[in-house]
Structures are given as structure tokens and as C-alpha cells.
Image: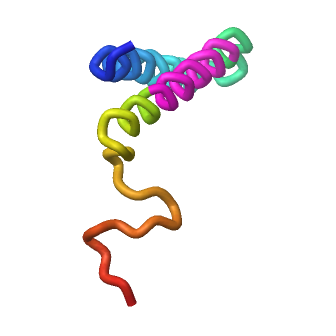
Amino acid sequence: MELQGLQEALKVEIQCHQKLVAQMKQDPQDGELKKQLHERQTRITALSEKQESSTATVGGRSRAGPGPGQQGSDRVAT
């Protein structure tokens, strides 16, 4: 799946997740809502990982910047 498609799918999943969270606030004991929320979180995580690997492949590294323990070009070494 191309990057733009991944981002659109991620956007839709996050919007659905937000709706489920709002519903859970109304009925926190609803087991079906908890199940749907967990499934949505799993999909968001999978899409996020695909997006991360896609951007790393395209740009040589993630566009989010350096990862933990890595030094970015805008940092000053001490």
C-alpha cells in the first residue's frame, strides 16, 4: 500500500477509535465496545508500523526525526 493510502487508512481508523472512546465514556462496562476498541487499536498499530517502514524506505530514515539514542543535525554536541 502506498504512503498516501496508509495515511488515509490510519486517519479513518483513528477517527473510528475516537468515536468508540466517546461511546465507552457513556458505557464503560460494555464488553462489545471494549472488544471493538481493542481491535481498532491493533489495526492502528499495524498501519502505523507499515507507515513507519514505508517512510524509512522512502527517505532513508523516518521523517519524524532521529530515533532514541540518535543525534539529529539540529542538536549541538556537548
Residue appearing at x 52%, y 18% in the figure: 20
Q: Report which quarter residue 34 is drawn in.
A: top right
Q: Quadrant of the N terminus?
A: top left
Please name the colour scheme applied to the rendered image.
Answer: rainbow
Residue 45, image x, y percentages: 55, 28
Determine whether 4 is above or below 68 in the image: above
**Nearer the observer, 49 or 41:** 49
Task: Please report the bounds of the magenta region as a residue range.
Answer: 35-50
Determine whether 68 is above or below 9 in the image: below
Q: Report which quarter residue 29 is drawn in.
A: top right
Q: Is residue 23 left or right of residue 57?
A: right
Q: Residue furthest toward the bottom?
A: 78
Q: Quadrant of the C terminus?
A: bottom left
Determine whether 45 is above or below 75 in the image: above
Residue appearing at x 51%, y 61% in the figure: 68
**Nearer the observer, 11 or 50:** 50
Residue 53, image x, y percentages: 46, 33
Residue 11, image x, y percentages: 35, 21
Residue appearing at x 40%, y 58% in the figure: 66
Residue 38, image x, y percentages: 65, 21
**Total numbered circles:** 0
Residue appearing at x 33%, y 16% in the figure: 2
- The dominant secondary structure in magenta is helix
Q: Is residue 18 left or right of residue 30?
A: left
Check if residue 41 falls in the magenta segment: yes
